[in-house]
Amino acid sequence: MEKIKNIAVLTSGGDSPGMNAAVRAVVRTGIFNGLKVYGVRHGYHGLINDHIVEMKSHHVSNIIQRGGTILKTARSAEFKTDEGRKAAWENMQKHEINSLVVIGGDGSFRGAMEFSKQYPVSCIGLPGTIDNDIWGTDETIGYDTALNTVIDAIDKIRDTASSHNRMFVVEVMGRDAGFIAMHCGIAGGAEAVLVPEIEDDHLRLFDLLEDGTARKKSSNIILVAEGDQVGGAYEFVKKYADRLKGYDVRVTVLGHIQRGGSPSAFDRYMASLMGVKAVEAAVAGKSNIMIGWGNGNVIEVPLDQAVKIHKKLDGELLRILNVLNV
């Protein structure tokens, strides 16, 4: 890989709190290292359509506390084509950019890997997704903030659940991964958690509920990941309507509030360190790596492994949840 000329940063896929902190760190670290730094608006779509602007230090002032992404984000079907990637490379050449920091999830990383195979681009990934489903990193940018948002909602829901002796089935994000549901289930004192990774867990749930009824439990909070085996909170209540007849059931879908909001102190801190290390890795001539988080510090992970290896939910967490609900 030739020496870095200029560097660009983009955010891709779903937004997550902390992306702005990462963008800020990339811009300022690039400037510190004598590079021109460009921001790409609307992800790969912006790369194809030359929505590329040079960024100075003042452009990233006062953004570290903001949720979402100032660069905007989008998914680009066109970038999956040879023609789309060719147009992106031609635009990068116009600005003499040969290094790209991609903040996003596994789909964004796949695009970066394919791009770097075809063209001499140094691609560095930063894991930005609230789902925490990227292998090779303990945490992803935005995950901690999403957990805090869900916990705040659960605490409020429990107040009304207890007041009315109701069961609340609360749906959280997690189409393919139950990290948010399981971690918030433990932290929020939920009676049960349903996640995509564990099949046939609904029958065990009813055993728990019957035991709770025997102990005259006044309310129940059931956390359901949107991609669980049944298909979400409403589908769960619909499918098991007969078994839930004895409960005053309410459904709450938290939805996109989990993606928004000011990032937590941890997400700001982690994203900032990741952004610095991403630029330093590019300057050092590295490519096709992800900057992750492990054992309390930033680490480097091969990008192909981050994409190919499936991150598993720790089954020990379900055992702990059950222990806490005796």
Image (cartoon, rainbow, N blue to C red):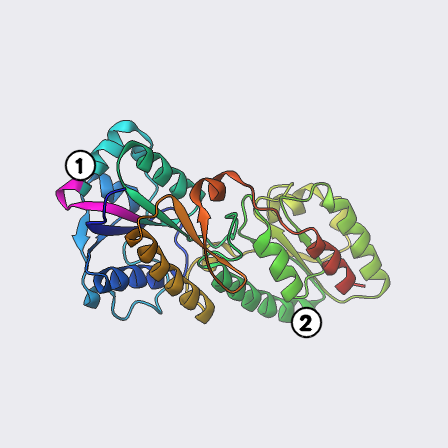
Q: Are marks 2 and 1 in contact (CB under 8 Å)?
A: no
Question: Considering depth in this image, is 134 or 326 the residue closer to the camera?
Answer: 134
- Report the magenta residues as a range: 93-100
Disc 2 vs disc 1: which is toward the camera? Answer: 1
Q: Quadrant of the N terminus?
A: top left
Please give the residue where the numbered disc 2 appears in the rendered image: 163
Q: Quadrant of the C terminus?
A: bottom right
Spot the residue most to the right: 214
Instruction: Give x and y (percent) for residue 267.
Output: 44, 65
Q: Is residue 92 left or right of residue 259?
A: left
Spot the residue most to the left: 94
**Dot 2 lies on which element?**
helix
> How many C-alpha atoms fall within 10 Å of the one at disc 1: few (<14), some, or many (≥20)?
some
Question: Considering depth in this image, is 307 or 219 the residue closer to the camera?
Answer: 307
> How many C-alpha atoms fall within 10 Å of the one at disc 2: few (<14), some, or many (≥20)?
few
Mark 2–mark 1 Cα distance, whole angstroms, equals 62 Å
Residue type pointed to by label 2: Ser
Q: Is residue 311 magenta?
A: no
Q: Earlier in the sequence, mark 2 or mark 1?
A: 1
Q: Is residue 269 visible?
A: yes
Residue type pointed to by label 1: Glu
Please give the residue where the numbered disc 1 appears in the rendered image: 90
**Dot 1 lies on which element?**
helix
Q: Is residue 308 left or right of residue 39?
A: right
Instruction: Give x and y (percent) for residue 232.
Output: 59, 46
